[in-house]
Amino acid sequence: MDMAWAFGIASKNDPSGLLAVRIDGQDWALLDSGVNSQLLAVPDRGWLLLEVRVSSPVVAARGLAPLVYQVLVFRAVVCHERCRSCFGTGEDQCLTCRAPLVLFKGRCEATACPTNGYFEWESYQCRLCDYSCAQCHGPGPEACTLCPALHFLSPEQIQDSTGPCTISCPVGKAAHPPSRRCRTPPESTMKTFYMRFLFRIVYEDMDYNSNLQRMVLNATAFVLGISLSDVRGYRINLLPYALEMVAEVTSPFLTQSDADRVLIDIWFAAFEIPVDEVLTLTWDSVHPPVPKLLEDPPIPAWALGLIVSAIMSFFVICPLYCFFFRRMNNTRKHYLVPVTSPVFMDIIVHQSPPWLVKRFMAHESGEKAHISDVQ
């Protein structure tokens, strides 16, 4: 069909509807119903895309998109119908695309680059991001805007929108779950809490398969939105019908209350093995207080024993000495009659007052001496 020019005509069946026409993905222009459009040049190579849009208030009120009709007019098929220029007739041999399509890996199939790609203005085509990026604004690992799971964006300045992705934040920074970035932690001290998981699995399967243990730690970090360096295995216990695993979580941006708000359904979907119970534990509940060490007594044990021995020896030896040894010694002594000095007798007998002598005589005779008699 060797035609150099073409035009379009459209009519509407809705009086309130509006018609618009667009050429090769350019801006929309109003089109009168039943009136020919302007003459359009058909290129020598490729095709001419003529689009007519019908919009209606009734359709818009129902939340539906306007109806678009597309017509392709071409002279000869050299490139694929979606290619503007090409190096072959195949759909993956495009060099440039018809608007509004974009070129990606030689194909013109989408109107935007994939999520893991960016548009290169020099070549007018989509390029894949660096393997370390989930989304980016350009080539290289420094142009990442979003990181894969378990990775965090680490820009040089907090206001930068791009930066490299890292699995472990640099020294002085920590993973921030809401923004998926490495940020400087607040001045408050980092608090540690524990996640207790109860799995329906025998101990042998968990013990001899290190991938299962790594899977639990990876899933915990993924669900909580923290770095792998913030999650560590703490304890594994074999219960009668299940396996208990406790993971230690240390993050300045994540609290125990944040972990409590995660539903059990999310945990169940995250693990490859069935989980029956997920419980958060505090540091104090996992680490009971250490018993206080006994203080050293003010008196050493050897000194206390020496004092007690001395006291007991005193209470044993003193009665023996007073009531046994002294008495035995006294029984063996000979009684000696004391010799009274004549001077002493003269002073006591002859020079004593009469009342004292009478009192002494009454005492010796056994009589009771009256004071009046004595005097």
Image (cartoon, helix red, strand yellow):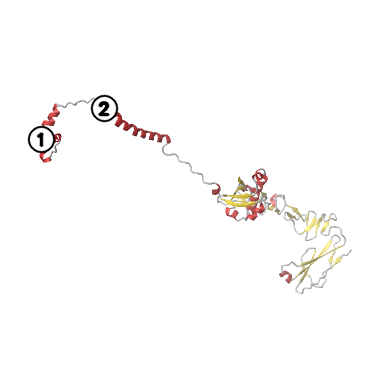
| Label 2 Cα neighbours within 10 Å, binned few <14 / some 14-19 / many ≥20 | few
Q: Is residue 192 left or right of residue 10?
A: left
Q: Which residue is mark 2?
A: 331
Quick check: 276 left or right of 108? left
Task: Say which residue appears at 15% left-offset and 26% top-offset.
Answer: 341
Q: Which mark is residue 354?
A: 1
Q: Nearer the viewer, residue 134 or 194?
A: 194
Of the image marks 2 and 1, the number of the one nearer the N terminus = 2
Task: Check disc 1 and report its element: helix, strand or loop.
Answer: helix
Image quadrant where residue 42 sits: bottom right
Instruction: Looking at this view, name the residue that lies furthest to the bottom.
Output: 15
Residue type at the position of mark 1: Pro
Q: Is residue 108 left or right of residue 132?
A: right
Residue type at tag 2: Thr
Q: Foreground residue, 156 or 146?
A: 146
User: From the viewer's perspective, is 271 left or right of 3?
Assistant: left
